[in-house]
Image (tube, rainbow, N blue to C red):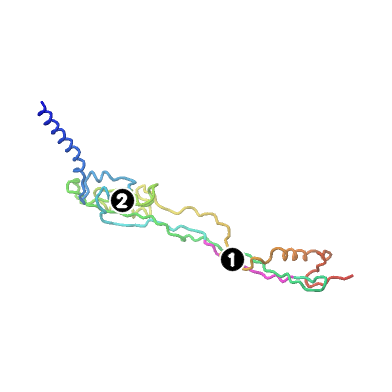
Amino acid sequence: MRKISAALIAVLMAAATLTMASPAQAVDHRTCVTLGEFRAIHRPMTYAQVKGVLDGDGILLARVDNGYYEGAWIDDGYWDSTYIDDGYYDLNDNWIDTSYWEDEWVDMSYYDDSANWVSFIDPVRSYPKCANFDRHGARRLGVNFDNYSSAYSGMRMWTKSRSNPWSLVDIIDSLRTTGGSNKPAPHAGARPAKPAPKPLTPDPHPHSGTGLTQGLSQAFKAPDAVRLRGLCRPRERCGRG
């Protein structure tokens, strides 16, 4: 009885060993693509994931940039500076110079429709099929990747062809003009609103035309009867009587 039990245990262990080894032995690392590997790749797998399943990079058939020019507002302009010659005589007949600069930024910003190029890359890669893949005459298959049709970032698989890799190249060519085969065609968004003017250089006279000098200038523009603490209008002398 003990001999039978030992033999049975040995048989079971051998069977378990074979069962555990089966998956590892089933892994195919040939450079050609099997039908099972072709079926295993799908949208939106990354380029690295597809490469891991198909065991290689394949051959690059086409790489098209379906991008577009994106417009932008370009800051431009210059400072318009005016010198205001101003002053007054004090009660001692001394001329007090209160001249100042008035600086105004002249906005000349504009919208450039071709300010930035936004790249949308569409590569098509061709991979060799294994001999028992199918009965199609073509010996290569195609996979199309892009960096814009998926909600995820990076290069992602969009579609594949089991018999005609060049058909994917045709889809990309038509995409640039028609949007081809329900694939989202990249395009520029609406023009943004014009931002507030932004001087490109510092104010040439940042402390001029402010504070006391402006206050005095405004005071001297008042009617002749108005005097500010004994100050007279520019280039006029105060009456003594």
Quarter assignment of residue 173:
bottom left
Q: Position of residue 145 (x, y in %)?
A: 33, 51
Cα separation, mark 2 vs mark 1, equals 50 Å
Q: How many marks?
A: 2
- Residue 138 visible, this angle: no
Quarter assignment of residue 98:
bottom right
The residue lying at 34 percent from left, 49 percent from top is 156
Give yes or no for residue 83 being in the magenta stretch: yes
Q: Are marks 2 and 1 in contact (CB under 8 Å)?
A: no
In the visual, does 18 lie left or right of 208?
left
Which residue, given by chain and number where applicable, does mark 1 sit on? Answer: 202
Q: Tell me the SS state at disc 2.
A: helix
Residue nearer the viewer, 21 or 29? 21
The residue stretch that appears in magenta: 74-86
Q: Position of residue 208 (x, y in %)?
A: 67, 67
Residue nearer the viewer, 65 or 13? 13
Residue nearer the viewer, 141 or 204? 204
Q: Tell me the SS state at disc 1.
A: loop
Residue nearer the viewer, 163 or 151? 151
Give yes or no for residue 164 being in the magenta stretch: no
Residue 74 to residue 24: above or below: below
Which residue, given by chain and number where applicable, does mark 2 sit on? Answer: 48
The furthest residue to the top: 1
Quarter of the rendering occupied by the C terminus = bottom right
In the visual, does 186 lie left or right of 16?
right
Q: Give the amino acid type for the residue marked by disc 2 in the picture.
A: Ala
